[in-house]
Image (cartoon, rainbow, N blue to C red):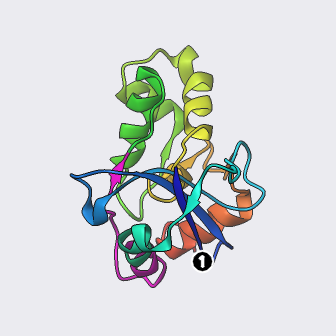
Amino acid sequence: MLYTEIDSPLGQLLITGRPSATAPGGMALVSLSVPGQKNAPAVQPDWRREPAAFVEAERQLAAYFAGEAKDFELEFDTGGTEFRRKVWDELDAIPFGETTTYGEIARRIGASRAAVRAVGGAVGANPLMILIPCHRVIGADGSLTGYAGGLERKELLLKLEGSLP
């Protein structure tokens, strides 16, 4: 596993990835996390710090935080169950500047209303926060609910995208 750490308005981001011949910049991203994030990976002794491998991801993230980019053109290697991948695909389809609810995601993937908790679990397990925009999911009543990186970071991202005043 290769990794790097970059500074951002959310704090230091830990990005991990694996080499990929098809990915922009040659790196398929496995995770992106912030300090204190629930279930965030920790650098392991056998991982190799390789900032040069993540130049393209860092460039796109800098453009996003500067308000110059709305989407990411990066390759992901997320793993996960089929259910989680369906949820993450729906997260990726939420347009910049918009929000949706857990119930709406359940509906879009054809899951029952009872599956909303499972959708919430899949959203919370998203390994690529920001890049797969789980911060765009809010409660049915419009409240900012759960975010593995902390609600203050969710609020910052939604304000950056113009979803919150």
Residue 97 x, y percent position in the rendering = 41, 65
Q: Identify which amino acid the numbered label 1 is placed on.
A: Ser
Residue 112 x, y percent position in the rendering = 47, 14
As drawn, is 64 to the left or to the right of 1?
left
Residue 68, placed above or below residue 104: below
Number of numbered tags placed on the structure image: 1
Q: Residue at x 60, y 53 (%)?
A: 47
Residue 67 x, y percent position in the rendering = 42, 82
Q: Residue at x 23, y 52 (%)?
A: 21
Residue 10, placed above or below residue 18: below
Residue toward you, 11 or 137: 11
Q: Which residues are magenta?
A: 60-76
Residue toward you, 140 or 89: 89
Residue toward you, 68 or 160: 68
Determine if residue 4 is in view: yes
Residue 131 x, y percent position in the rendering = 44, 57
Q: Residue at x 69, y 51 (%)?
A: 45
The part of the image, by quadrant, that contains residue 10 is bottom right
Determine if residue 164 is in view: no
Was residue 12 drawn as part of the magenta stretch in this picture?
no
- Name, please, the residue furthest toward the right: 36
Which secondary structure lies at badge 1? loop
Q: Residue at x 42, y 44 (%)?
A: 91
Residue toward you, 45 or 118: 45
As drawn, is 1 to the left or to the right of 75?
right
The part of the image, by quadrant, that contains residue 74 is bottom left
The part of the image, by quadrant, that contains residue 56 is bottom left
As drawn, is 36 to the left or to the right of 125?
right
User: Which residue bears the numbered disc 1?
Assistant: 8
